[in-house]
Amino acid sequence: MGKSQVRNNIRKLRFHHDEMTQEQLAEKVGVTRQTIIAIESAKYSPSLELAFRIALVFGVPLEEVFSFSSGKSDIQDNLYLII
């Protein structure tokens, strides 16, 4: 089994929100700019609370900001949708 990974669309969302900087986002959600950098580069997975705060800043559902890949094939990841 491959490595699981939390992916995100933060950079794209920042761009579409008046080119919000990493510093501005960090201030809005109460973390450091370095934390936002680590999350954007998938080197750090945020807590569930922080993930929701980020989604709230952009005004989108959590699923539009973050996605999870278990390292299995796409068919296995999406099997629950069929059942």
Image (spheres, helix red, strand yellow):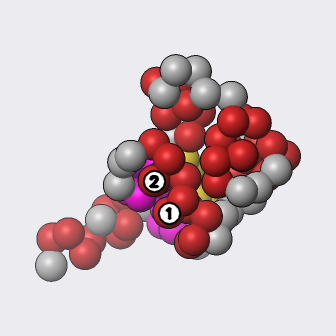
Cα–Cα span, label 1 and label 2: 6 Å
Identified at 51% across, 40% down, the residue is: 9
Give the amino acid type for the residue marked by disc 1 in the picture.
Answer: Phe
* 67 relative position to 27: left or right: left
Element type at marker 1? helix
* 52 relative position to 44: left or right: left
Identified at 56% across, 72% down, the residue is: 48
Give the amino acid type for the residue marked by disc 2 in the picture.
Answer: Leu
Q: Quadrant of residue 50?
A: bottom right
81 to 31, vertically: above or below? below
Mark 1–mark 2 contact, CB under 8 Å? Answer: yes
Q: Position of residue 31 (x, y in %)?
A: 76, 55
In the depicted view, which residue is nearer to us: 73 or 44? 44
Identified at 41% across, 58% down, the residue is: 62
Q: Quadrant of residue 77?
A: bottom left
Q: Position of residue 34 (x, y in %)?
A: 84, 46
What's the magenta region? 62-72
Residue 40 sits inside the magenta stretch: no
Residue beneath disc 2: 56
Identified at 15% across, 79% down, the residue is: 83
Q: Is residue 12 visible?
A: no
56 to 17, vertically: above or below? below
Give the residue at the far left of this rendering. Answer: 83
Q: Position of residue 19 (x, y in %)?
A: 58, 21
Q: Quadrant of the N terminus?
A: bottom right
Q: Quadrant of residue 75?
A: bottom left
In the depicted view, which residue is nearer to us: 39 or 22? 22
Residue 68 sits inside the magenta stretch: yes
Residue beneath disc 1: 52
* Few, some or many residues within 10 Å of mark 2 (<14, 14–19, 20+): some
Element type at marker 2? helix
